Image (spheres, helix red, strand yellow):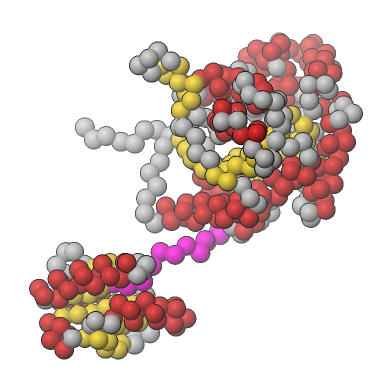
Amino acid sequence: MSIHIPRGTADVLPGEVELWQFIEQKSRDLCQRFNYKEIRTPIFEHTELFQRGVGETTDIVEKEMYTFQDKGGRNITLRPEGTAAVVRSFAEHKLFGDPNQPVKLYYIGPMFRYERPQAGRMRQFTQFGVEALGSYDPSIDAEVIALAMGLYEELGIHDLRLEVNSVGCNTCRPVHRDHLVQHLGERREELCADCQSRFDRNPLRILDCKAEKCKEITKQAPNITEHLCDDCSPNFEQVKEHLTRLGIAYHVNPRMVRGLDYYTQTAFEIMAEGFGAITTICGGGRYNGLVESIGGHDSPGIGFAMSIERVLLTLQSQKIELPVKRELDCYVVAVGEQAEKEAVCILNKLRKHGLRADKDYQGRRMRAQFKAADRNQARVTLIIGDDELEKGIAVVRTMATGEQQEVNLNEVVNFIATNMNTIEEEK
């Protein structure tokens, strides 16, 4: 019986992986401009990290985590999101003592959630995210949002919709909680089973329920923005002011609470036309109590995460082609036993010069080798045979024009490397 890939996962094959590399490199370049440094955390962590960090009443912790016991009897979970692991690392390595504050970090890597697989929602998926830890300044909130919006714009994604909200803090949230419980109390039995369970533990999560029945029941529920305290209300106003000054259009959505318990104050989502409808492609917000909740020094933070898979689906939906370089610089065509041996040496020299080069390994005839050069979109072919070897030359053909010239065999590698920019212009 043949073995197939596990459900909810996907192979990224040559031809597609170049798109991933392009997006990842764009992300890294943008983070460098914003002075964010890369961090790499383990793919698995102690389960308690996500229970305490993400929240025990979240769908992620209750339903979606890949959790197992290792040989030492420890409960281990494949990371379902990136923030908790970054915050754990921040606390464990005492980065709150770094003189450069806030500590600005980014990550790119696989996450795991046991969900029903569908477009843009796989059981293994790749997230790009940033975290800024150590500042309460509302301008860092705007900066994080600007970075996320900037990446989409640089990729050419359009018709973006930014929704923002404030989910308050430990001072104003209990007030909103009391009003929410009072409003929903008479209809508690009509809520879905999950929301009935959340009613006592974390009623705010009911506003995030996707069940149509619960959406209808909570339609007239009181909004957190009506109960913001004297710290959260001006903070939210300053975040919005910064966004306006940066020229970033936004919509206030007082119903948005996000799906993770650690959020405080600023919360946001970025949406785009894709998948046949307006779809959330990025989400983030503040988490001022998260570091302390996992045993670290109390430090504020804000960040976001986006799925690379959803970025690709959005690009596809909006018919945007990325300028991905797929072609070879040079394909070596060799005919004859001695020419084949010389081709191996020339190929190695071309690669040492930083050129993308290849040759035939199937013993094909010259015509078939030229077809291979075309398939590989080679910018030039370097042709050598027994006659060329006797004369000490090689023939260099520019594929876009068909123009050929003879070059001394000892100088042909330097010739190609030196003239590659000219060849690009002709192409």
Expressed as whole percent of the image width and height from the top left, the position of residue 310 reads 55, 45
Q: Is residue 141 above or below residue 328?
A: above
Residue 413: within the magenta? Answer: no
The percent coordinates of residue 120 (x first, y second) are 53, 41
Residue 257 in view of the camera: no
- Identify the residue at horizontal 40%, vertical 64% (top origin): 326
Side of 27 relative to 237 (left or right): left
Looking at the image, can residue 164 be seen?
yes
Lateral position of residue 282 relative to residue 163, left or right: left
Residue 188, quarter of picture: top right
Image coordinates for residue 100, horizontal then vertical, percent: 67, 42
Q: Is residue 310 left or right of residue 339?
A: right
Above or below: residue 14 compared with residue 201: below
> Principal SS element in the magenta part?
loop
Name the residue located 81 percent from the left edge and 17 percent from the top edge: 174
Residue 240 at x, y percent in the picture = 82, 44
Quarter of the figure with the N terminus: top left
Farthest-out residue, left: 337
What residue sits 71% from the left and 32% below the top? 300
Q: Residue at x 34, y 82 (%)?
A: 415
Q: Does residue 323 show up magenta in the picture? A: yes
> Of residues 129 and 370, which is closer to you in this image?
129
The image quadrant of residue 296 is: top right
- Rendering quarter of residue 124: top left
Instruction: Report the magenta residues as a range.
Output: 317-331
Nearer to me, 152 or 43: 43
